[in-house]
Image: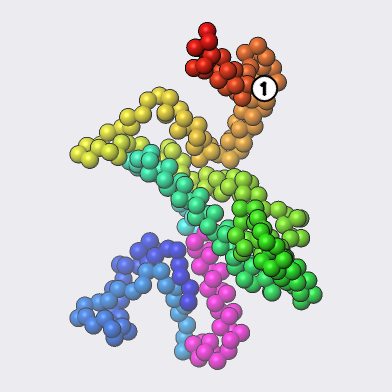
Amino acid sequence: MMFSTLSHFDVSEEDMAIPITNLFGDRPSISMQTIPATNVYIHVNPDEADRILVDPAYKLERLKEAHEKLYAMHEAYKEVDRQMAGQRITLPTPYGRDLYETWYEIEKSISKFDRIFNKVEKFNARKLSSDPETHARREKRLADRRRERSVDNYAFFFGNMTEEEQQYMDYFETDLENDPDDEFLETRRDEARIANSGEFDPQLYDFVETAMISEVHENFQDIIEDKIFKFKYRQNADAPALHAARNNRMVSRFLERAKTRDPAIERDVASLYFEDSKYNSLAARMID
């Protein structure tokens, strides 16, 4: 069974009256019945239908042909939509900044959950991830270290990991050495993917105050908060190449300023707190 991302309503198929009441015995009605809007149908003559039932190779060939045509149709619709985008007038959607930030964090959390889920699936199917000799060697290493943690040691610190996470690290130790997991980089990739989707472009939304129930009002934030919001979600507002150029310029100038700072006005925070507690404490004031 194939499903289309375009419904029949998108290609005006709802204009055709298709009385298929007799095909659905569980939905009796005297009028015409609707059909599923995302199913893909292959029309063949009776001889081809019989061959599809008895010839698996021919069935796969026809399914492949249908998939290719369906993909071509979808790409044609996407191309037409892309070319017509410049002639379309789209008004910004009224949306709250708090909802925008919550939505953004939810998308990042979903991406993180997907990574964890993929690791769990990879570990559960570890027997199929390598040849038998490699699997036996890795399984022995996992069992030895698990026994060392649970039997041979009185106390063992997992390094802020659960037993299952430690087993994953033990089994895929070589893979992690060649390609280590970096949560910071994975988060950056998720942010880039979310920004490239285009759904979080601030220009698409007219940010309003969601606390107002009886009327629509613009945000109550001041200019500073507006600039902070713009800077925080700057990656979603710029094209990837433009964001990379601006971000590299920001980092390079920050490093230049860090090299040329005046030591007379630069203070270590720890020493500042120490001097404050030493000279401005209650005991020091009583001595003075």
Residue 257, image x and y in percent? Answer: 66, 20
Task: Left or right? Give the position of 202 relative to 135.
Answer: left
Residue 207 visible in the shown view:
yes
Residue 123 drawn in magenta: no
**Image position of 4 with respect to 109: above or below:** below
Q: Residue at x 61, y 84 (%)?
A: 57
Q: Residue at x 30, y 36 (%)?
A: 209
Residue 85 visible in the shown view:
no
Residue 37, image x and y in percent? Answer: 37, 69
**Image position of 92 with respect to 106: above or below:** above
- The magenta segment is 48-75
Q: Residue at x 58, y 36 (%)?
A: 243
Q: Main secondary structure of the magenta part?
A: helix
Kind of element beneath mark 1: helix
Q: Residue at x 21, y 80 (%)?
A: 29
**Image position of 200 with respect to 180: above or below:** above
Residue 144, image x and y in percent? Answer: 74, 69
- Label 1 crowding class (10 Å Cα cut-off): few <14, some 14-19, many 20+? few
Viewer-closest of 157 and 175: 157
Snapshot quadrant of residue 192: top right
Reading the image, the residue beneath label 1 is 258
